Amino acid sequence: MDKVAILVAGGRGTRMGTSISKQYIPIGGKPVLMHTLEAFYHADSQIRLILVLPKDDFEFWKDLCFQYDFTLAHQVVSGGATRFQSVKNGLDAISTSSGLVAIHDAVRPFVSGGVIKESFEKAEKSGSAIAVVPLKDSLREVSIHDGWSQFRERHKYRLVQTPQTFQLDKIKKAFETPERGEFTDDATVYEFQGWQVTLIDGNMENIKLTTPEDLEYAEFLLSRKK
Ligand SMILES: Nc1ccn([C@@H]2O[C@H](COP(=O)(O)OP(=O)(O)OP(=O)(O)O)[C@@H](O)[C@H]2O)c(=O)n1
Ligand SMILES: C[C@](O)(CO)[C@H](O)COP(=O)(O)O
């Protein structure tokens, strides 16, 4: 079974507030993207790697690869204006409709090899595999207008991560639909077709590097590995 990973890094990382986009920031001595590409390669060296980047950054990325002597084979594809468009561009770069594809935020470098492997195994059997984790804190629903809030049972909810892995024919078909506001990830695009997604356990360290304190946590995680 052919396996592909689309690592989306077509965003600008505005919430990180750094001068270079967060996907290129060095953590543990090398750019975030290199850690993420390596995580997939180490999980299974047969996975074909597609990296989605803003078109303007292609030369910069090439220079970084040269500077860090990064030789792991991967295909670079142009990003779009939204995450949905970037994923779609990645899918369009895959000519076959058979096999499996893991779609992953390239700014989640701490995805475990076990989660990557399980996502492919589960998606092969059931069509999809979405990594999720339980909530650690109590949960309340709030009204932003009048201060109303109410307790919610946290055991009924999960936080959604990536990878989100799918049978290629199904996710390609799902992404033919026009983009909608509720498409915050790939699972929402898939289930818009009326198909139910399958959840798998993610790993807690697999955070999305989003705001500056996440970089401190990233350095801490990498220091533990040494
Ligand atoms: N047009 C876009 C927007 C986002 N992404 C990717 O989707 C992932 C999750 O998005 P997010 O964390 O929101 O990244 P940014 O859009 O870069 O961040 P921000 O919202 O802070 O600008 C990231 O790997 C990001 O690069 C993408 O490929 N193409
Ligand atoms: C895909 C995602 O990372 C799953 O948690 C998330 O939905 C991306 O959201 P963002 O709005 O781009 O931060």
Image (cartoon, rainbow, N blue to C red):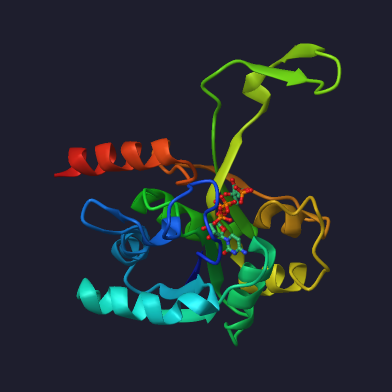
Total count of labels: 0
Residue drawn at point x = 73 percent, y = 52 percent = 188
Q: Position of residue 81 (x, y in %)?
A: 67, 68
| Residue 213 or residue 99, whichever sits in front | 213
Q: Position of residue 142 (x, y in %)?
A: 77, 20
Q: Position of residue 75 (x, y in %)?
A: 44, 81
Q: Quadrant of residue 147?
A: top right
Does 169 sit above or below residue 17? below
| Residue 112 or residue 98, whichever sits in front | 112
Horizontal side of 90 relative to 108 (left or right) equals right
Residue drawn at point x = 64 percent, y = 81 percent = 92
| Residue 96 or residue 225, whichever sits in front | 225
| Residue 79 or residue 35, whichever sits in front | 79
Horizontal side of 200 relative to 156 (left or right) equals left
Q: Position of residue 2 (x, y in %)?
A: 48, 77
Would residue 21 be seen by someone viewing this image from the given angle?
yes
Horizontal side of 70 relative to 197 (left or right) equals left
Q: Quadrant of residue 123?
A: bottom right
Residue drawn at point x = 46 percent, y = 75 percent = 57
